[in-house]
Image (cartoon, helix red, strand yellow):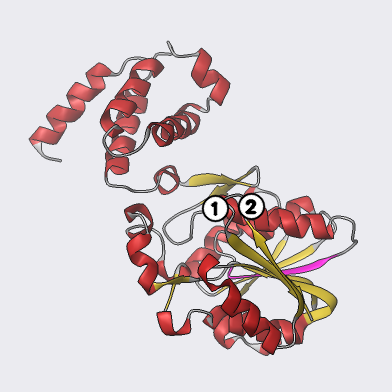
Amino acid sequence: MTNNNKSYHAKSNRQIKSLNDASIYIKTELNNIYDKFEIQSFANIIFQHLLNFSKIDILLKTDTELTNHTKIQIIKIVEQLKKHKPIQYIVGETEFYELKFRVSPEVLIPRPETEELVKWIIDDAVSKQNVDILDIGTGSGCIAIALAKNLLKAKVSAVEKFKAALVIATQNAKLNNANINFINDDILQYKKNNFTDKFDVIVSNPPYVREVEKKLMNNNVLDYEPHSALFVYDNNALIFYDAIADFAIEHLKTKGKLYFEINECLDKQLKNLLLKKGFKNIIVKKDINDKNRMVRTEL
């Protein structure tokens, strides 16, 4: 750390005495980078993480005095936010479907639209008994774990190619007391002996962002989230859907269902691919932002 940085941090530290001071500091420092709603969200996450305060605590305990350690942590977090590092990676955790998940740059940060996909599956399966579910490309494990926690009689398995991501998914299963059968495999060249079972539900949120779409994405995604979990080549954008559909033909039970999160620009191409493979009852569903982001189909 340079002398200028040390001086700046020392000055900032002196300015922050209470929770209210910290809130003002966060808003002032980030004002020209993020909008006010995102800044308030950052502040809530920071105080929840460092102080274990609820949103009500944050509103009511503004005069809470902060320790020197807490002030230093706030300053460090703000400096990382200025570099567009996602707040979830900075604090090392996030929420998904009202559950807590550890995250790192080895895995994608779970998105709200993926919660909508999970809810669709739960609504379809909640009345059924002993549902066998497979999540392909599990990443942080958010889909598999949320399903296991909400479908208590389900038997849930999850596939992940990258061992570093699988470590995080395993930690998240323990954190949430969820029983998941994790499998280290690559769906593009999966080993048939890993999958002797058949499933009532196969779900995947695979890489689907085309290279041409990179210019539309924010720096916090491009600079920090794993590209292997995001991007596909423009000339083969449905590569994972193609492989997963072939897998599903072999491994779905009778009346079993296949669910995908999708690129809104590729819904028609995906529907045609599935029809050619013999899938039927293909439903494309919009997310809360009125975008075609989910598909359900069956054989």
Instruction: Identify which residue, 25 or 106, lies in the foreground.
Output: 25
Q: Is residue 11 above or below residue 144?
A: above
Q: Mark 2 falls on what kind of element? A: helix
What secondary structure do most residues of the magenta stretch adopt? Answer: strand
Which dot marks residue 203?
Answer: none
Q: Give the residue at mark 2.
A: 115
Numbered marks: total: 2
Q: Is residue 50 above or below residue 137?
A: above
Q: Quadrant of the N terminus?
A: top left
How far is mark 2 from mark 1, CA to CA? Answer: 7 Å
In the rendering, at what x and y percent does residue 12 appear?
22, 24
The boundaries of the magenta stretch are 131-137
Q: Is residue 187 above or below residue 130?
A: below
In the rendering, at what x and y percent does residue 63 appear?
42, 10
Q: Is residue 243 above or below residue 97?
A: below
Q: Are marks 2 and 1 in contact (CB under 8 Å)?
A: yes
Kind of residue at disc 1: Arg
- Give the residue displayed 33% in from the left and 17% down from the top: 21
Would you say 63 lies left or right of 286 here?
A: left
Q: Give the residue at mark 1.
A: 111
Residue 121 appearing in the image: yes
- Give the residue displayed 66% in from the left and 53% down from the top: 116
